[in-house]
Structures are given as structure tokens and as C-alpha cells.
Amino acid sequence: MTVSTRLHTCVLCEAVCGIVLETDGERILSVRGDRNDPFSAGHICPKAAALVDVVVDPDRVRTPLRRVGDRFEPVSWDAALGEAAERIADVQRRHGGSSVALYLGNPTVHSHGALLAVPFFSRLLGSRSRFSATSVDQLPQQLAAYEMFGHQLLLPVPDIDRTRFLLVVGANPAVSNGSLMTAPGVAERLRQLRARGGRLVVVDPRRTETAALADDHVAVRPGGDAALLASMLHVILGEGLDRPAALTDRATGLDEVRAAVRPFAPERVATRVGVEAERIRDLARDFARAESAVCHARVGACTQPFGGVVAWLVNVLDAVTGNLDRPGGAMISTPAADLVALTRRIGAQGSFDRYRSRVRGLPEFGGELPAAALAEEIDTPGAGQVRALVTFAGNPVLSSPNGARLERALPGLEFMVSIDIYRNETTRHANLILPTSFGPERDHHDLAFYALAVRNAARYVEAAVPPPPGVRHDWQVLADLGLRIHHAQGGRRRKAGPALLMRVFRALGPRRTLDLLLRLGPHRLSVKKLLARPHGIDLGPLRPGLLGRLETPDRKVRLAPPRHLSDLARVLTDLDAPPPALALVGRRGLRSNNSWLHNSARLVKGPPGCTLLMHPDDAIARGLADGAEVRVRSRAGEVVVPLRVTAEMAPGVVSLPHGWGHGRLGAALAVAAEHPGASVNDLTDEERVDPLSGTAAFNGVPVEVGPAP
Ligand SMILES: Nc1nc2c(c(=O)[nH]1)N[C@H]1C(S)=C(S)[C@@H](COP(=O)(O)OP(=O)(O)OC[C@H]3O[C@@H](n4cnc5c(=O)[nH]c(N)nc54)[C@H](O)[C@@H]3O)O[C@H]1N2
Ligand SMILES: Nc1nc2c(c(=O)[nH]1)N[C@H]1C(S)=C(S)[C@@H](COP(=O)(O)OP(=O)(O)OC[C@H]3O[C@@H](n4cnc5c(=O)[nH]c(N)nc54)[C@H](O)[C@@H]3O)O[C@H]1N2
Ligand code: SF4
Ligand SMILES: [Mo]
């Protein structure tokens, strides 16, 4: 056996760690961090080893499968693609284009081939019923960027390597490894921030692993962030701590913001926020007076009832303190392939509320409807009902709010096709499963996450091992299925353009397409140039540039977008709402990746990952002991899970991770079935959304907890 080493990039999270794989040509034998990658410098996390496990997993789908009764049988690609296209076109003929829904899951963003193919695929499908993980994740941040900066991908990245004050709101980078902030080895970067005299403050109802690294932990009451940020702005603008000079001629709406935050005095919000007024005042003053400061908000800030307002106020806070678009504050990356320019060219700079979902009237964003509405669009009869579904790299049964309702709805579909590497809780409902290659089996350049990196960097790696025989790349499946659907629809003239572009893309392939984008990009790179520097290249620190790239009509930052501004009224009303006895929030585990790495034996071994965390006072009040099985109930449903009693939780708040709930009949995940856990999304409520953006409000769900029956 000849063993060689191949360089690759981990595709499991946003940190894009460079990795060195040992392979015998077919299999991967080991994974380690690439110390010569200038960006990740050898860092990896425990999940990286699971790359190997997925590649060789006996449960992986390696041939197209067709469901016959409760069983799945292998079929040829030709038969599978032909049948899928015919059935989709048939449903569309009978019920209209939007009767076929599309759901794109998180790993889509980790494959440049898929990212390039998806826009053409969507157009060829021709449906307004498009959904993705965006609306269970970062949508509020994209909406704020769209409204304030004119483009949904002008997402300011915290300059964590230079800032003097990092305020983390509803994020746990020590475990998640950073999100909308590509920062390999982020825990070390946070330690360095403190080592150079900077301050780290974490706002989270749980004393998280990140809070443990911080100077201060602010145990906010779930959903109290909007009031907290508004109050900080009240103090900063009221005490003249803002730096208006930084915004003169570059922003509009400061007076509206000033007026809007006036009712949010610290004394007024303290109860709702769960923090004393004096502490809010100090936090505001410290942030404003710091040499540089930046706020990093993520999932806990977005997936809650005020996610839209929070994302907006975060940008406002950075802006009025003079920290928007300057070193140590928030800036945009300058990636090798200019994603902002590319998306603008294809008309994808963003859009909001051009139409609404049929049943509940939730707003469209960027051509998509909120995932919280998917189940009701399937199970509510009437004109425009969704009758067929295409999923790509997603597991919405476990990842969307009230996944149990979605699960009940899926069997009612006339047809479902899933493009995925596993037969899991969602794809087991499909009539056809189309498998794809996986990370190390394809070339990789992180089109999406270099655009969100805390330092400009680039790396292009070639496939390290071949995909299993007969398995195709994700972009090939999207291209072939898209073109066959177009054919089955009768080759409509209206779609001649997208069909031609898809054929050109199919012929060029992602490598040559990307090469073009790199050559046109700001660093004038190419695949060849990147391959000559296989460990990746450093393109320097973030530079100011956001203000020069604004796409608002007047090229100014819109500090007070009307819809955000008026949504503050809801925050004000909420100040007096009584808290639920227990509010459920989410978390992530270091050895877990959303719903799909639990089939890796080495990641699931050890203590159970799916436990309910509860403060000792709450446990005593309910007579519950550490380790007991407890029943958690919400409006949507109930689950039974083991309890962990810990003072890291704020009283009144319990925490359960998502992505569990395996072992369901018909799924083929043998290891995961032995460590099933329960799905928190059988408790979360599809009716709870941030009404401004339509984003799922996973956090703050009222629950009752008692002994398991
Ligand atoms: N309660 C609660 N729910 C949440 C969250 C939360 O914090 N709390 N977080 C939300 C967030 S942030 C996200 S991003 C979503 C994720 O939600 P989803 O994207 O719907 O689900 P994942 O669990 O990421 O599932 C990814 C799927 O992609 C497949 N896959 C992996 N690699 C590939 C590939 O290369 N090609 C193809 N074709 N398939 C592949 C896997 O087998 C799996 O089926 O979950 C959300 N759900
Ligand atoms: N190990 C691991 N890493 C991952 C993932 C994974 O599943 N496992 N998933 C990846 C994905 S898809 C994403 S999007 C990122 C997410 O990355 P992060 O957002 O950094 O990760 P989370 O752990 O979801 O952090 C959310 C935090 O919000 C807190 N929270 C809940 N409700 C509230 C609230 O009302 N206010 C405040 N202030 N905080 C609240 C929770 O207690 C939690 O600590 O992680 C990525 N990285
Ligand atoms: S931090 Fe993220 S990118 Fe790095 S090894 Fe872990 S999962 Fe992979
Ligand atoms: Mo996510």
C-alpha cells in the first residue's frame, strides 16, 4: 500500500481549516491540521476526523435509490433522473409551477459547485416555493445588510484580530468555531484579544464555553437583546458618546434612531433584559469609549422573536460608535472571487416582501419563503398547495421548527426527490434519493466563507480521493436534473436563457467557472495560481471598503430602515410581558454538526450529547435530579431527554441542542440510531417567528418540564 498525503479543506463548518489527509489513493487514513496554511495555521477541531467516517460510512447512499413501499431499491441514474423530471413536470402541469417546492440545506454553501449550479437550477424549476436553511439561521443579518447597505451579502465581519472590545451576542464561537465570521482557531484568537488588553463580553442566557473565556458574562433573558441594544444606544446617544463625525455624509437616519431609542432607558428595560440598569449603562459606555469595538451576533440573536431588530441594532451600534468600516471594528472581506459583484450581476443583491407565503402571509426574502411555513404549505389544501418537494443537502424534519408537523406532512406529497448523501429522517420520505460526492472527493474553494473571513485568504484544493463509483458531483446532479426538468416541461422558451447558461456551466464545470471569477476578482488570481500555492495564500488583513461599496440608492448607510424602525414598537410592548416559567433555548456541541454527523462512532461515543440543561433552583422546584429522564412539553409537542443540572444556565432558562432525534423507521443511520437523542424541533413552534423577517424563533420557547412518565 502506498500512502500519500493530500491537502484539502474541511467542509464541516465555516472555519475552512486547511487539512492534510493521508490516503492510500482510495480511502482516507488520517486527518490533521495543515500547519502551513497561513490562515488556519494547523488548527482543527474534533469534528474533522469525521470527514474520514463520512467518506467510508457503510450507510452512505452510493447509488440512486427508489422507494418501493417501505423499501429502497437501487436504480440507474438515467432512470432516476428521468423519473424525477417527469414527475416534477407532471405535478407542475397539473397544479402550477409553485406546487413543487425546493429546500436547500446548509451544506449547499460549503460546495462551490453546488453554489454555482443552484441559481440556474432554481430558475429551471420555476417555482416560488423556495425554502432554505437561511430562514432558520442568518436571514435577519442578510435582511439588515440589504436594508442598510443595499446588498444582502454586504455582511460586516468583526475584525477580531485587532479589536479592543468584542461584544458577543447569542453566539458561541468557542464551540461553533465562528459563523458569519470565518476565523479558524477562533478560541485562540479570543485569548489573544484579551492578552493584548482587549475585552470580551458575552451576552447569553447560558454561561457558555465562550463566556468562560470572557471578561464578562451578561446573562440576558431570552429575547431581551433588542431591548438591551436599544438601551445601549439610548445611553450612547443620550450621553453624547457617539462619533457622529464618522457618519457625516455617509449615513442617513441618525435622528430617527435617536428618537426611536429614547423610550429605552436602562431602568425601563432592566427587568425584561434581566440585567441591572447600571450594568447596561456601563456596558454602553465601555463599548463606546473603547479604542475600537465591535459586536458579533449570531444564531441566538437571529432565531428569536426580535431577530430582525437585533441584527439591525447591532449594525447601528457599530456605526454610531464609529466602528463600522474601520480596523478593529466591522469591515467586509475582500475575497478572491467577488461574491457581492457576482450576485449583483445575477440580480441576487436581495429583495424583500415582493410576495408572501400562501397560508400565513410570511414575507419573501431573496426569492425564498420562510422554512417555518413549509409544513403548512404542504398540509393546507387549496389552490397553490405544495404537492411535490425537492430537497438538496437538507434535513428539515430535524432542523425546522415543529419538524414533527413537517414529518407528518411529507407522506401526503405526490412526489419527493432528495439529493443527499444519507437516507435520514427527511430523505427517507423521498420517492427517489440521488447521492452525491462529499467534501474530500471534490475540488474545493470556499466561495462563500472566504467572503466572511476575518482575514483575506484563499485556497484551492483538488479532490483528495475519488468519489465512490457511480456517485456524481452535486453540481452535476443539479445540472442534469435541472435540464431534464426543463425538457420534461416542454422546453419552455421563457427558460431558454437559464437552460443555455446551465448547459454552458455543465460543459465548463465549476473549476473553469471559478477560474473566471478568480481572474475577474480583486486579487486577479486564478485556479492555476492558487494550485501553485497549495497551502493557501494570505491576502492581508481586512480593509475599510464597505462604505465605498454601498448599493443603497444614495450610496449612504440607511441607519433607520422604516420597517425595522417601526418593529421597535413590538420590543417596547414586550417590555411588560411576563416571562414564561421556563424558556427553552438551543445550543451546539463540539462533537456534533447540525443533524448529520451522529453516524460517526467516534463523535457520538462518551456522555450523551442531547441533554436538557437546567439551573439547580429550577430543578429543585420541580423535584428533578441530575441524570433523571425528564419530559419537556411545549405547545407543539413533547420529548423525553436526560437532565443535566448546572449553574451555567440562568434560572428560568433550559437548553437543548438541535439535530438529534434519530432511530426513526426507514432511516439508514445505524450508529446514530444507537444514540438517538430527541429532536428539539419537535418542541419548537412553527407559529413562533420573527414577524419582521419570517425567521424561525427557536429560542425562548415556553416549555414545562417534569419527570418522564
Ligand atoms: N432548534 C434549532 N434548530 C435549528 C438550529 C438551532 O440552532 N436550533 N440551527 C439551524 C441552523 S443554523 C441550520 S444551518 C439548520 C441546518 O439545517 P439543514 O441544512 O436542513 O440540516 P443539516 O442537519 O445541516 O443537514 C444537512 C444535510 O446535508 C447532507 N449533506 C452533507 N454533505 C452533503 C453534500 O456534500 N452533498 C449533499 N447533497 N448533501 C450533503 C446531510 O446528509 C444532511 O442530510 O438547522 C437549523 N435548525
Ligand atoms: N460544533 C458545531 N459547530 C457548528 C455547528 C454545529 O452544529 N456544531 N453548526 C454550524 C452552524 S450551521 C452555525 S449557523 C453556527 C452557529 O454558530 P453560533 O451562533 O456561534 O452557535 P450557537 O451554539 O447556536 O450559539 C447560539 C447561542 O445563543 C444563545 N441564545 C439562545 N437564545 C438567546 C437569546 O435570546 N439571546 C442571546 N443573547 N443568546 C441566546 C445560546 O445559549 C447559544 O449559546 O455554528 C456552526 N458550527
Ligand atoms: S473548526 Fe470547522 S472547519 Fe475546522 S476542523 Fe472543525 S469543523 Fe472543520
Ligand atoms: Mo447554520
Image (cartoon, rainbow, N blue to C red):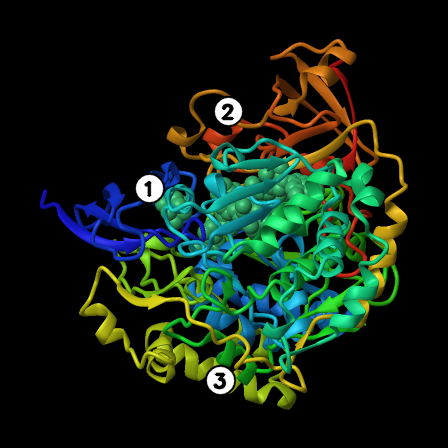
Callout 1, which amino acid? Val
Residue at x-position 66% and y-position 76%:
126
- Other residues around mark 2 within 10 Å, as few (<14) / some (14–19) / many (≥20): some
Which residue is at the front of the view, 348 or 467? 348
Give residue 691's position: percent from left, percent from top. 81, 57
Q: Earlier in the sequence, mark 1 or mark 3?
A: 1
The reply to whether residue 358 is visible in this rendering is no
Apparent side of residue 499 relative to residue 469 in the rendered image (left or right): right
Q: Name above or below for residue 555 compared with residue 390.
A: below
Asked whether 656 or 52 is in front, the reply is 656
Q: Which mark is residue 56?
A: 1
Tell which residue pokes out farthest to the left in this image. 2
- Residue toward you, 407 or 373: 373
User: Where, by quadrant of the figure, is residue 337 drawn?
Assistant: bottom left
Question: Which of the labelled discs sits on residue 674, or is there none?
Answer: 2
Q: Is residue 339 above or below residue 35?
A: below
Q: Secondary structure at mark 1?
A: helix
Alpha-carbon span between mark 3 and mark 2? 46 Å
Element type where label 3 sits in the image: helix
Q: Circle 3 sits on which residue?
A: 501
Percent x, y of residue 123: 61, 77
Q: Residue at x 12, y 45 (%)?
A: 3
